[in-house]
Image (spheres, rainbow, N blue to C red):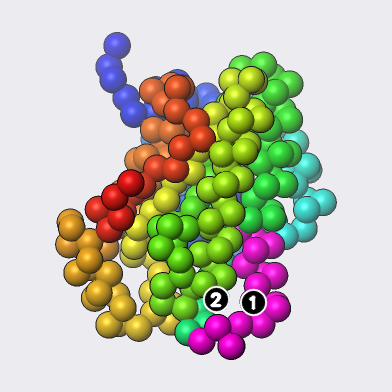
Amino acid sequence: MTWSVGAGLEGKGVLVTGAAGGIGRAVCDAFGKTGARVMAVDLEQAKVDEVVAGMEGSGHVAVATDLRDLSAHEPLVQRAVAELGNLYVLASLAAVLRRRYSIDEITEDDWDFQHDVNLKAVFFLCRAAARPMIAAGQGGRIITFSSQGWWTGGIGGSVVYAASKGGIVSMTRGLARTLGQYGITVNAVSPGQTHTPMLMTGLDPKVYESMKAQTPLGYVSEPEEIAGPVVFLASRHASYITGSTINVSGGYLMY
């Protein structure tokens, strides 16, 4: 049998949030190449339609929803089960960043907005997605997204964002302990600096150059370099990995 990073994913249902973002689009494309059926979720229908239109394979679905509305989670998951045929993977990438270079400029709305999207919505969607995985009795894969900021603290005006991503790491470990009995693995991917609109918006060019200088590989990654580890964690090759935070930072941090 030919070795494939996406082994075991053909015909599996995959729900990807943040699908229209730089990394989210690359993750959708990568899952499409494995033969999985993907539901691409983001805020704007036109953008997720574009993502799905460019994917390989068939059976993909584009859905626009605001994940801050927790009442939308259960219908979204049920739609994924119905339209994809099953739900085996949740890749939760949706996140927001508001840079505030002075902590005195951070408002309560800044805090709530980032934590509502980056942490609160992720927990409740993971919980909703786990239910049909448990009911199906075939195990599953939940992949969350942290950031190197969970370890370093906020850099470049991202204190609140980093705090939310620290919560993701702890939450991922707790979910892994809870869901392991059902054969569901839960892992986090922690990208380093990745060339996406989220990174570049409002970022001081000097900080960007400093990031490159501090990265042993000497460059900022492209989204496709983050998608590979996501597909690996969803595949059968990662069946004995759970509760882990996978460092994909070009050596920016080493742990």
Q: Amino acid at mark 2?
A: Arg
Q: Is residue 160 visible?
A: yes
Q: Amino acid at mark 1?
A: Asp
Disc 1: which residue: 110
**Residue at 46% in and 22% down:** 239
The stretch of residues the image draws in magenta is 102-118
Whether residue 108 is situated above or below residue 168 in the rendered picture: below
- Residue 48 sits in which quadrant? bottom right
Q: Secondary structure at mark 1?
A: helix
| Residue 155 vs residue 218, the one in the foreground | 155
**Residue at 30% in and 55% down:** 253
Disc 2: which residue: 98
Q: CA distance from mark 1 to mark 2?
A: 7 Å
Image marks 1 and 2: residues in contact by CB distance under 8 Å? yes
Asked if residue 115 lies left or right of residue 12, the reply is right
Whether residue 15 is situated above or below residue 71 in the rendered picture: above
